[in-house]
Amino acid sequence: MKPIQILVIDLGSQYTLIIERTLRELGYRSAVLPPEQSKKWLISHKPNAIILSGGSFSVHLLDSPRPPDKILTMGIPILGICYGMQWLATELGGHVITSQDKKEYGKATIVHNKKSNLFENIKGKQIVWASHGDSIDVLPKGFRVLAKSSNNQTIEAIGNSTRKIWGLQFHPEVTHTENGKIILQNFLKKISHCQTDWAPKDIITNIQQTVRNTIGNQKAIIGFSGGVDSSTLSAVIAPSLGKQLLAIGIDTGALRKYEIKEMKTNAKATGVNLKIINASRRFQKALRGLTHSEKKRQAFKKLYVKILEEAAKQYNAKFIIQGSLATDFIESGKVGKAVLIKSHHNIGNQWHLTEIHPFGNLFKYEVRALAQELKLPKSISERQPFPGPGLFIRIVGTPVTLPKLAILKEADATVTKILKKRGVYKKLAQLVVGLIGVKTVGIKGDGRSYEYPILVRGVQTRDFMTVSGFDFPPKIKKEIEKTVTKHARINRVWWCSNDKPPATTELE
């Protein structure tokens, strides 16, 4: 395999691995490393391009992350993004300020200099995605402004073609930046002269070889939910591992209607051997009385690990393979210095087994591409995500009980059926139906009703790092409200169309 051409230095952004994902979309492999590892890596590697990620820090803080100083004198083209640009500006003699007037969070409109090859093939104004509190007020010597915000308040892009250094205040890697891929392609191809070197089939081959070499002649189990991640991973590795691999599905009692049936169907399609463990009572006991989202997730994780280790012992397995994605590692705070958003049941566990995450640098859309490459059925490749803790984290503000789970399962099945019938379900990246633990007064049969509201949330996204809330058509909303509230224990339907950020996809 050819040497990696692009180094991405991770400075603690929630979007760091989205940069890597976008580069793969454009056909490029890359190495994503924190500053200290980057310094060591550069001793024996000379990439064609270096990208500095954003980050949650301010350059004015003493403990803010610092890329290796040597990158400024290597003659390698550098693109700094958000904090990365601010670090470049400060390091090269410019100045960065914290200004309330120049803070930007969300979509912004910029105007660029058409003479810059960084913005080649992009016309007029463009919408970008910004997330910053600091901004440049004094340019380093030899640099020029390449783009400003439409109100001329904020410097949005800078460059020095002689020193081969460029910076962007916004995030080109995020899908909300409408011409982000063009900007990155201009930097990689026209400025850095990188050649495409990545394709989905390479990932499949690499995973098969890596897992086979790691496991050798030992046995392994894989956590299997029937979702696109665990199903696709099973389909990738099952042919080469055969009887050395056993898929373990866990019935937690918090699965949706028909989930077990779908789990069995998808396991059959992937060719993996499946064992389902009924642990409903154990999970009910472990989460009894809990309402705080992180406490529920932690309790779920602890029992999840215990059950899988018991299954591995019975099977005499030494390895646990999981379909964890890049988004799981990011939100769990396991990438660079990214902050914790929420705990994930399959990340950061203390195993007595050797843990393998073959999909750890992939995003949901990439796994779907692998599923299609493997010719898996649409029931897998197009299946919406469902959280590991299941409906436990869709019952909000009240302890989870079997009656509440029963209410939510029926509501979820009803909403899903209506949306599929009306052709709306396929437009969503994910549907979330939750039970809100604050009872409200209603009327049932001319009598007083005091029951729980159901919340319905749909989102659209490619990478699940940022999402757009979906506004359901009024007629469909009315149909859902009328149908769902026929249930004796439901008297209201609430709607959530918030974007991420500030909300997350799930309720907890």
Image (spheres, rainbow, N blue to C red):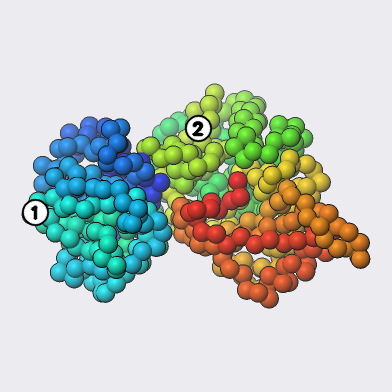
Quarter of image, res 273: top right
Quadrant housing the N terminus: top left
- In the rendered image, residue 403, in percent from the top left (x then y), is placed at 81, 46
Q: Name, please, the residue furthest toward the right.
A: 446
Relative to 227, say whether 471 is above or below.
Answer: below
Relative to 134, say whether 333 is above or below.
Answer: above
Relative to 486, say whether 307 is above or below.
Answer: above
Under circle 2, the secondary element is loop
Residue situated in front as seen by the camera: 217 or 255: 255
Give the CA distance from mark 2 to mark 1.
46 Å
Task: Look at 29% across and 72% down and name the residue there.
Answer: 125
Residue for badge 1: 142
Horizontal arrangement in the rendering, residue 56 relative to residue 488 (left or right): left
Q: Please tell me the numbered disc located at residue 348.
A: 2
Q: Which amino acid, by three-letter code, is at mark 1?
A: Gly
Q: Is residue 239 visible?
A: no
